[in-house]
Structure formats: C-alpha cells, structure tokens
Image (spheres, rainbow, N blue to C red):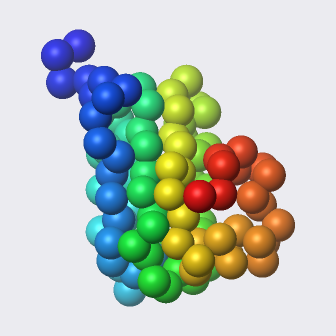
Amino acid sequence: MANRKKKSDPPLVIAEDMTIYHAAAHKQGLLDALLATDRLEIDLSAVSEIDTAGFQLLVLVKREARRLNKEALIVAHSEAVRDVLDFYNMAAAFGDPLL
C-alpha cells in the first residue's frame, strides 16, 4: 500500500507525559499510527512522567500489534518509562532493548 510506513521512516515521538490526563489522546494517536504501518517504532525518550494509564497504553499497542500481525517497538526509553517497566517487571515481556 502506498501509505504504509517504511522501515526507514522516523519513529513516532511522544514528548508529552503519558498519564491518565493524556491517555485518551495518546490512545487514539498510537492506534492510528499502528494501523498506518506494519512496523511502528515508538520513541519515549522525552516522556518525563508515566503512570499506570500510560503503561496500559503501551500494553494495548503491543497486544494490538500482535493481533494484527504487526510490530510495535519502543526504540527509546526515558528514565520514567524504564522505571515503570521495571516496577511492573515487564521489560523482558515487552522484548524491546532498554535504550
């Protein structure tokens, strides 16, 4: 398809906090981006705050990618994102290198 992202496309950068206050907007944006490509790369290096709602969005995107036979990769993590993944002991389950 012509609108499919290629592997060389830049990652989706999320620079806002991934908290319950932004969850609805992030959810729609992440799902739309996933539907537009076979391989979604997500850069979370600028996320300064993430709570359980933000973590749930990451789980949702990973699950939807598997369901659709696509890839969703977190290609950069902020310290806050690494802390949440460690807190929930999910770094290995996500399978993304912690950068």
The residue positioned 77% from the left and 72% from the top of the image is: 86
Q: Residue furthest top?
A: 1
| Residue 26, picture quadrant | bottom left
Position of residue 50 in the picture relative to residue 37 (left or right): right
Residue 5 in the image: above or below residue 60: above
The residue positioned 39% from the left and 73% from the top of the image is: 46
The residue positioned 45% from the left and 64% from the top of the image is: 44
Please say whether residue 89 is visible from this viewpoint.
yes
Position of residue 53 in the picture relative to residue 15 (left or right): right
The residue positioned 44% from the left and 31% from the top of the image is: 39
Residue 27 is situated, as x and y percent measured from the top left of the image, at: 39, 61
Residue 94 is situated, as x and y percent measured from the top left of the image, at: 70, 50
In the rendered image, the quadrant that contains the N terminus is top left
Q: Residue furthest left?
A: 2
All told, the count of numbered labels is 0
Please say whether residue 24 is visible from this viewpoint.
no
Position of residue 91 in the picture relative to residue 53 (left or right): right
Residue 30 is situated, as x and y percent measured from the top left of the image, at: 37, 53
Residue 88 is situated, as x and y percent measured from the top left of the image, at: 78, 71
Position of residue 74 in the picture relative to residue 36 (left or right): right
In the rendered image, the quadrant that contains the C terminus is bottom right
- Name the foreground residue: 64 vs 11: 11
Residue 48 in the image: above or below residue 11: below
